[in-house]
Amino acid sequence: MTALPNDAWTTPQPLDNAKTLPALLYTSAEVHAEEQRRVFARSWQCVAHVQQLAAVGDHVVAEVAGVPLVLVRGEDGELRALHNVCRHRAGPLASCDGRGARALHCQYHGWTYTLSGQLRSAPEMREAADFNISEIRLPQARLEVWRGLVFVAIEQPPPLAEVLEGMDERLGTIDFSAYAHHQRISYSIAANWKTYVDNFLEGYHLPHIHPGLNKLLDYRSYQTETATWHSLQSSPLDRTTNFYGSGEALYYFIFPNTMLNILPGRLQTNRVVPISADHCRVDFDFYYPPCEDSDELERRARDLAFSDEVQVEDIAICERVQRGLASGSYEAGRVSPKRERGVHHFHELIRRVWR
């Protein structure tokens, strides 16, 4: 592996004297590969909503830590996260989200599995000695549902209840399970996944990068709270300058790469997917309560447009920061205790998985 500065960077750092992670963690291909095992295979990933998987045969495809998955509702009503990899020669079973499938068919050689992952038929395998269809089934990833959001994990992560501890109390009666999936928008970003997460975790840049968002939020009242595995940024909404109505904006970060952006009548989930050391993709999923009111539908159209405006601004600065990280000019910088508490919290979790 590319040599990191030394083990000293993994030592916990108090907020008032903390530095950022070493630049090499944002640019090294070896670090990127190792993170798949250390970070992503061992963490919960928010990949779908139960409304997308409501009926038997409904399915959603995803990939976690390099492992292709298909989430599917079985004939028994159970929701499973099956490896989307045929046991024959690793062919794909499902290539896209869908509704009402009766079985899972390998697109390579036609092997067929039940919706629970049991092999049902294997064409032209009668001559294979000691070949027993009943002994072959698709491996499963861990799966849990929280407030309608579906989380999966490849290896043994901390319990999801521990990861999300305290969030139910803060969210109260907000019922995401009643929301419907409206749209997914994905952005390709020429930056390391941690560069994007760092940017999400602080409002320090609002006055400088996001003029529209800065008008929506109350920067002076912007707060960051941290728990063991997640953090929350919150701000009252400025009622005179926004179309969301009264209330507050809640921006949750769930380690390592899931964001929940909650505004009145709207949930937006973001999952930052690492592609390479200097490239990531962010999947934005928008959820709203069922509604046919024309004024509300117009508000949702404005929400989508405004979100895109903010993302274009974020992408531009993240890509420029990535170039600075790769330039050789920068090693690590000081953290603002007032404005970058969330960044520090994230960096401490990264240090923890490397110790």
Image: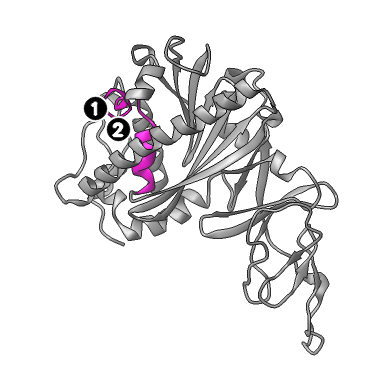
**Which picture quadrant has residue 130?**
bottom right
The residue tagged 1 is 17
Q: Residue furthest front?
A: 294
Estimate the x, y position of residue 44 in percent, counting from the top left. 56, 43
Range of residues picked out in magenta: 192-210
Of residues 225 and 98, which is closer to you in this image?
98
Residue 69, position in %: x, y? 62, 57
Residue 159 spot, x, y in % from top left: 61, 38
Asked if the magenta segment contains residue 69, the reply would be no
Q: Which image quarter: residue 317?
A: top left
Question: Toward the viewer: 283 or 9?
Answer: 283
Q: Residue at x 43, y 52 (%)?
A: 274
**Extreme right residue here?**
76
Residue 190 sits above or below residue 144 on the image: below
Other residues around mark 2 within 10 Å, as few (<14) / some (14–19) / many (≥20): some
The magenta stretch spans residue 206 = yes
* Amino acid type assigned to the residue bearing label 2 in the image: Gln
Q: CA distance from mark 2 to mark 1?
A: 7 Å
Secondary structure at badge 2 equals: loop
Picture coordinates of residue 246 (x, y %)?
52, 11
Task: Examine the rendering and report whether any part of residue 8 can be seen.
Answer: no
Quadrant containing the N terminus is bottom left
Task: Judge whether 90 appears above or below 21 on screen.
Answer: below
Residue type at mark 1 is Asn
Marks 2 and 1: CB-CB under 8 Å? yes
Name the residue tied to disc 2: 13
Residue 296: quadrant of the picture: top right
- For image coordinates 61% across by 27% down, the residue present is 297
